[in-house]
Amino acid sequence: MSKKKMSPEEIVKYFKDEFKAKVKDSRVEKRVAGVKKKEFVNIWLKIDKSVFKDVIKHLCDIQFPHLAVVSGNDLGSTIELIYHFSLYYGERLNEVSLNISVELPKSNPVIETICDYIPGALTTEREKQEMLGVKIKGIPDSRRLFLPDDFPEGVYPWRKDETGPKDMVRNLHEVKK
Amino acid sequence: MKKKESVKTTTKTTYQIPIGPIHPALKEPVMFEFEIDGERIIDVDVSLGHVHRGIEWAGMQRNPVQILYLAERICGICSYSHPIAFARAVENACDIEVPERAEYLRVIHGELERICSHILWAGVAAHEIGFDTVLFLTWEMREKALDLTEYLTGNRVTKAIIMIGGVRRDITSDMVPKVQETLKYFKDNFEKLRHIFLDDKTVRLRSQGCGVLTYDDALKLCAIGPTTRASGVKKDVRVDQAYAAYGDLDIDYMTPDVLTGEVNGDVYDRIIVRLLEVKQSIDLIEQCLDKMPSGDILSEPKIPKLLARVKKTAGEGIGRHEAPRGEVIHYVKFDGENDNPYTWKARAPTYNNILPWIPMLKGEQIADIPIVAASTDPCISCTNRVTIVDNDKNSRYILNREELHRMSIEKTRRLMK
């Protein structure tokens, strides 16, 4: 909190200066709401997998971020994870939503854990492992979260390929308990 | 004290549905596994997923207007918070404007839900420590809030008021007196509620210094809502972000130091925060009634036209809303070919408040489990089955909800002597 507050453009620049071409895409969305047309901001950053952990470290240097959740997309040959953070909360109308996305190849869907920086990420990382079939390297607790213990291995509910649940849902009577 | 590895148990599920995170309503199954030494809790493990319904997966096969009604059924109490977060995510992805009047109406319904939920919680908390008369008193008050909800939306619980790009029903000038009358009832009865919870010696004995969550833990474990604010972390989407009409209104963070001048992060502080927020919600509804501009309540009343627009959109969006229990966030992605979302992720507040349970419960007594667990107002409330691992006897036994509740009441009675 000690440092000066950066504008959304400065936040994007901060990451671009540090990681250059590894920041693959960036988008700043500004919306207004209410009669007084007060502004709120969403930042979308797409980064390369290789700098992911470093980006999170730099993010923590700005201010301890609030991690809302990690969501994920099956994009065909890759799996995209989107980390939804918010920065500068705790002051009236100052919050910036920062969404950092990273793509992992399906052949090797491994990403480092961020639990060492943000311990609260554990729940959502566990959920991503079971739902998307990604591997979180160094996760402190790799058990399943929502899925029951007797749920078949190798079926990932959010996948849209052959490891997805489509066949399973269609033929529920065949699922072995 | 020798620390032992916690023994893993499996729970029996009746059947399996493959997908999606859940948001079970109050008193639904969640399993804690405690490691106990005598009466003290040494370690806690929480198992989830007993009522997995695969709602998100079901949503991905439906269009956004259908999802609104599905989202409403994620939770029986936050039946307004999920649809509004989802609608905001779709509005974000598809660039849909919301009329100004609708923004104010959204605040009114949101705050009404908060009053309902916090008063309901107050009753449940009283029940957990054995004050069932207070349960009936608070739920009588809540009944008034439900009556008002029914008057404004046509439904008591699943409100079906949100539409993408606005709301479905207006509050006309002839409806305002009824709203004001109910608000007056809450204001008149608020003092009674405050006196019961904050001045009563036994409630203080049970809640002060109990279930402490420190500022650092709240921050690091990403706790949200009244749970984190009671520990002094200023995090409230309504104040942090200009969304709906909150940017226009006079609103501030409700932390316990507003009332007492200090932050302890215990169960008592969480009671204070919720009571302050009930008062704040009454004030916000009054502000909205004063300032509400006239005009449309829906930007696109023709649903096929709305869906055609969604179908053309290739993009993603997020929607946040401060539900009674804390921030709820929805993420949607559309692929530009179908009107059903490519991805829909709903994250309910309790999801983030699971990890904070662990530091809260460690070191407490078995009889404190119900009130500490209930103090975060979990949607997967209540310890419906608890496995006790006794270190000395090296044995394992299961306490059911009734026994646990009885132990909690007995502790209250002991303190009252």
Image: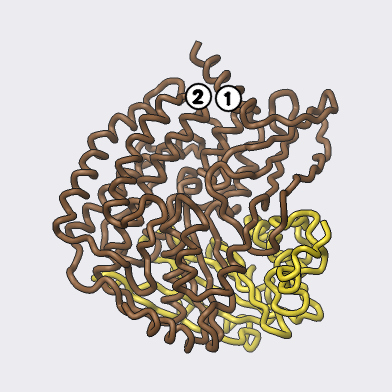
Chain colours: A yellow, B brown
Specify the farthest residue to the top: B417
Residue B400: x and y in percent read: 67, 31
Q: Which mark is residue B130?
A: 2
Q: Chain of mark 1?
A: B
Query: Which is more toward the observer, B87 or A31?
Result: B87
Q: Chain of mark 2?
A: B
Residue type of the residue flagged with mark 2: Gly
Residue B149: x and y in percent read: 31, 51
Q: Dividing the image into 4 quarters, which one contains the N terminus of chain B? A: top right
Q: Which mark is residue B194?
A: none
Q: CA distance from mark 2 to mark 1?
A: 7 Å
| Left or right side of B323 for B7 | right
The 10 Å Cα crowd at callout 2, few under 14, some 14 to 19, many 20 or more, is many
Q: Earlier in the sequence, mark 2 or mark 1?
A: 2
Query: Which is more toward the observer, B181 or B191?
Result: B181
Residue B194: x and y in percent read: 34, 32
Can residue B160 be seen by looking at this rendering? yes
Residue B53: x and y in percent read: 62, 58
Residue type of the residue flagged with mark 1: Ser
Both labels 2 and 1 in a single chain: yes
Q: Are marks 2 and 1 in contact (CB under 8 Å)?
A: yes
Element at badge 1? helix
Specify the farthest residue to the right: B394
Element at badge 2? loop
| Left or right side of B139 for B10 | right
Name the residue tied to disc 1: B408
Image: A93 above or below B197: below
Q: Residue at x 80, y 42 (%)?
A: B9
Image: B60 above or below B194: below
Q: Where is residue B44, by image quadrant?
A: top right
Q: Residue at x 69, y 60 (%)?
A: B17
| Left or right side of B187 for A83 | right
